[in-house]
Amino acid sequence: MHVHAYEKIWLALSIVLILLLLGSVTYGAVGPGIAMVSDQQDPLDPEALDEDDRFAEPRVEQVGENEYEAYVVAYQFNFDPDPIVVPANSEVTFYITSPDVIHGFEVVGTNANTMVIPGEVAEITVQANEPREYGIVCNEYCGAAHHGMEGTLEVVPEEEYEQRTAAEADDGGEDA
Ligand code: CUA
């Protein structure tokens, strides 16, 4: 069978394209180490968050010298805690869940952006450098007041953070 030279070139090119496509899809899935929502995660009952160690009291916790963990609940139509206060020059890992429907958690102006699914814990790590205030928005349609579902992330100077945490401890750990 005679195959025309041009046809051979196009055949070869299309095979290369297919391989590139498969390669890029594979790389996208495993290359950058992006974890998918896992089904190995401990199950979390969205209706019993008040009995969960992490989410009964949404809060920011210090876990290392400059490392913090924030446990956040996104619900119709707010974020708890609000504001989320963290010290400057720290690394903050957010753990976010929802008791009701799917929400979003986006720190405006950064690339921190995740979906928040009932029964799952979204995890996202942010470098908090300079003191400043960020808006937090929900970008998944979640009901009538979705457009008004906003929170605040306050990155405050380290001394101010210490003063605030000390003040809260004096209050018997109650939120101000
Ligand atoms: Cu929560 Cu939209």
Image (cartoon, rainbow, N blue to C red):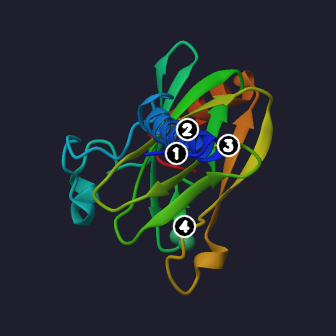
Alpha-carbon span between mark 3 and mark 1: 51 Å
N-terminal-most mark, 3 or 1: 1
Labels 1, 2: front one? 1
**Three-letter code for the amino acid on which mark 4 is drawn:** Asn
Secondary structure beneath label 2: helix
N-terminal-most mark, 3 or 2: 2
Labels 3, 2: front one? 2
**Three-letter code for the amino acid on which mark 2 is drawn:** Ala
Alpha-carbon span between mark 2 and mark 4: 55 Å
Alpha-carbon span between mark 4 and mark 1: 66 Å
Residue tagged 3: 111
- Residue 151 drawn above or below residue 148: above
Residue 78 marker: 4
Secondary structure beneath label 3: loop
Residue tagged 2: 12
Labels 4, 1: front one? 1
N-terminal-most mark, 1 or 2: 1
The residue at 74%/26% (across/down) is 129
As rendered, which of 176 and 105 lies closer to the eye? 105
Q: Are marks 4 and 1 in contact (CB under 8 Å)?
A: no
N-terminal-most mark, 4 or 1: 1
As rendered, which of 113 and 137 lies closer to the eye? 113
- Residue 117 drawn above or below residue 166: below
Q: Position of residue 38 (x, y in %)?
A: 28, 44
Q: Are marks 1 and 2 in contact (CB under 8 Å)?
A: no
N-terminal-most mark, 2 or 4: 2
Alpha-carbon span between mark 4 and mark 3: 21 Å
N-terminal-most mark, 4 or 3: 4
Q: Residues within 10 Å of mark 2 (few under 14, many from 20)?
A: few
Residue tagged 1: 3
Q: Position of residue 130 (x, y in %)?
A: 80, 28
